Image: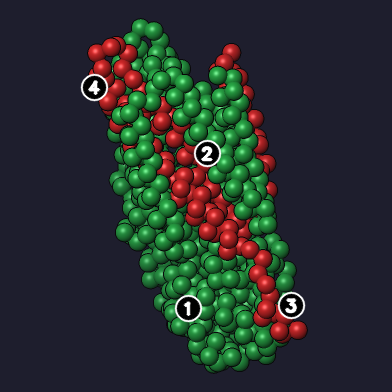
């Protein structure tokens, strides 16, 4: 039941994505790619869980746990590059699309 | 627990709003802010949940902090320093990181199934989770190496020409079958055969390379969009394992976003998606050009001639292409447009969907050069205006203006929607030489009476024109 519920969300989100992305103006397709990069790095939640994994027994962490923790730490770093880099570069690009004061044109008329 | 799920839902909705904001430049910055807030909520809630479960011991905290600090610093520095012309390769690099992060999360889940609540109670992993992890890892690995190749081609570390391996389709199929067999072994052993998982990882890494190397440089808009889509599906697969709504929603959004962009790019080239990803296109340029060496006369002109013609025009439409990006001519171009406007000339920009190396590439470069976005038009909005324009100023574009796409059914680009520059009274073509465009098709526009070729580096030519105005 749980799985079906998640699958339903997945399917509906594909439809939402379909309509939302078609409404994105072509001029902003590059920022769209940059920001989708940033948000897909929400995979960092999995990275954090892996990094925080604990050994089952009281004997302390075994090798498997350390592999999981290491993979989690690497994934956190990779995702963090994208989160910071993706949102910041998107912001930098979008700042360039500000409405320009038309000094030059104003002078010509 | 319910509250945590709810918080993830909120962050998923904020991500939807982030994309929604991009429907216009005015709302886009707000949208980006929503995205950041959504991400902060997702990370914050995850940390709180881990704290509640007593999973945050000092070692873990150090691991997480070091990881995020290192990644965050690199990301910040890169985002500040990267030049706008390098945006396609930056996006490819970002895709590769999402892919690798997905692989690492899958490995983490495989080695610590209890932390992810996917153990079957018998030291194994639940069937459904095995499939999700294997798929997430396989797609992530393909995204990783595929994006690295795309990066190398876009960044010039690797030639943009297609590399055709012998029996490449057979090789790809064999790799795919190998991955499926290994997934079968994973299922049969309840996920205990970790060697099979590493095998999936390795085969998928190779598959990513063999899938992308046969695709030529100018088909990269499609490839970058497609890899964008893959990174989304990889995230979604792991979202099911983590039972995380934010990740599932994001994966679906990014997956469909990339798929739609690929579709738009293919349509703009009148190419079938499968023919693009099968690759091999654009490799026979030399052969085609070599067959047609007849020297036909073309009219050439100097910067002064171009300046004179444009000064006396009442309407100029500028058509930028990848050559403008290579020459970094966008700033000089805007200066030229400013001078023309001072002379009372109406200036507009016309952008073909596949101009440049990624969707929206030209728009970003023009925005960087402070060109107001309401002077920049898409193909379908401006195409009818060429008939009333005195000058079409084509800078660094070629195939997207070739009338053969409309008139010559034997042409490789027949059926591709093009910008009707030939309808303008005069066509000025800034080009380095007479070489054919990427598709290997000669552009008959060069030989028309109303065309003047301006042979030079795009930036130098435009600077020359600015001086002449």
Residue matched to label 3: B388
Q: Quadrant of residue B16?
A: top right
The chain that hosts pointer 4 is: A
Which residue has dot 4 on it? Answer: A63
Residue B264 shows up from this direction: yes
The residue singled out by tag 1 in the image is B458
Which of discs 2 and 3 lies nearer the camera? The answer is 2
Distance between the alpha carbons at the discs numbered 4 and 1: 59 Å
Circle 2 chain: B
Could you say which chain is coloured green in the image? B
Indicate left or right for A36 with B67 as reference. right
Q: Earlier in the sequence, mark 1 or mark 2?
A: 2
Determine the residue positioned at 61% across, 62% down. A97
Query: Neighbour class for label 2 at 10 Å: few (<14), some, many (≥20)?
Result: some
Q: From this viewpoint, is residue B150 visible?
A: no
**How far across and how far down the image is residue B307, in percent?**
58, 89
Question: Which chain does the residue under circle 1 lie in?
Answer: B
Residue at position x 40%, y 13% from top? B119
**Residue at disc 4, secondary structure:** helix
User: Residue B40: which disc?
Assistant: 2
């Amino acid at each position: 039941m749980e799985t079906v519920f998640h699958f339903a969300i997945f399917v509906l989100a594909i439809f939402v994505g379909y309509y939302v992305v078609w409404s994105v103006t072509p001029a902003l397709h590059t920022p769209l790619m940059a920001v989708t990069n940033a948000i897909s790095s929400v995979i960092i939640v999995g990275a954090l869980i892996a990094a925080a994994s604990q050994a089952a027994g009281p004997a302390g962490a075994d090798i498997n746990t350390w592999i999981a923790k290491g993979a989690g730490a690497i994934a956190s770093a990779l995702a963090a590059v994208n989160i910071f880099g993706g949102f910041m570069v998107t912001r930098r690009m979008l700042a360039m699309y500000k409405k320009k004061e038309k000094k030059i044109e104003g002078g010509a008329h | 627990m319910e509250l945590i799920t709810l918080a993830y839902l909120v962050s998923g909705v904020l991500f939807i709003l982030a994309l929604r904001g991009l429907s216009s430049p005015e709302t886009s910055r707000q949208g980006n802010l929503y995205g950041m807030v959504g991400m902060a909520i997702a990370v914050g809630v995850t940390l709180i949940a881990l704290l509640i479960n007593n999973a945050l011991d000092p070692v873990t905290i150090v691991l997480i902090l070091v990881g995020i600090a290192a990644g965050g610093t690199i990301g910040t520095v890169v985002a500040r320093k990267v030049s706008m012309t390098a945006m396609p390769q930056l996006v490819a690099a970002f895709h590769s990181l999402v892919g690798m992060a997905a692989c690492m999360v899958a490995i983490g889940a495989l080695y610590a199934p209890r932390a992810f609540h996917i153990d079957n109670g018998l030291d194994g992993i639940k069937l459904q989770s095995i499939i999700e992890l294997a798929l997430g890892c396989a797609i992530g690995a393909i995204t990783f190496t595929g994006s690295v190749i795309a990066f190398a081609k876009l960044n010039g570390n690797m030639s943009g020409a297609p590399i055709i391996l012998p029996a490449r389709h057979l090789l790809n199929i064999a790799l795919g079958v190998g991955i499926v067999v290994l997934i079968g072994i994973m299922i049969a052993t309840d996920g205990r055969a970790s060697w099979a998982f590493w095998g999936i990882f390795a085969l998928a890494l190779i598959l990513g390379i063999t899938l992308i190397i046969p695709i030529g440089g100018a088909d990269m808009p499609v490839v970058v969009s497609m890899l964008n889509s893959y990174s989304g599906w990889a995230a979604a697969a792991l979202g099911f394992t983590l039972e995380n709504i934010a990740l599932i929603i994001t994966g679906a959004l990014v997956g469909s976003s990339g798929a739609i962009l690929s579709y738009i790019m293919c349509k703009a080239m009148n190419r079938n998606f499968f023919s693009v990803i099968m690759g091999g296109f654009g490799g026979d340029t030399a052969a085609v050009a070599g067959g047609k060496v007849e020297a036909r006369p073309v009219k050439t002109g100097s910067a002064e001639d171009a300046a004179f013609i444009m000064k006396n025009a009442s309407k100029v439409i500028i058509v930028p292409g990848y050559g403008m990006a290579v020459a970094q001519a966008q700033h000089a171009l805007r200066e030229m447009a400013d001078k023309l406007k001072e002379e009372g000339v109406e200036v507009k920009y016309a952008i073909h969907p596949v101009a440049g190396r990624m969707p929206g590439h030209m728009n970003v470069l023009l925005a960087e050069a402070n060109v107001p976005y309401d002077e920049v038009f898409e193909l379908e909005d401006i195409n009818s205006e060429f008939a009333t324009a005195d000058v079409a100023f084509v800078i660094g574009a070629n195939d997207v203006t070739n009338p053969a796409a409309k008139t010559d059914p034997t042409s490789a680009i027949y059926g591709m929607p093009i910008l009707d520059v030939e309808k303008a009274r005069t066509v000025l073509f800034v080009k380095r030489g007479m070489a054919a465009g990427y598709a290997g098709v000669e552009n008959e526009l060069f030989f028309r009476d109303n065309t003047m070729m301006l042979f030079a580096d795009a930036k130098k030519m435009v600077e020359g024109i600015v001086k002449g105005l």
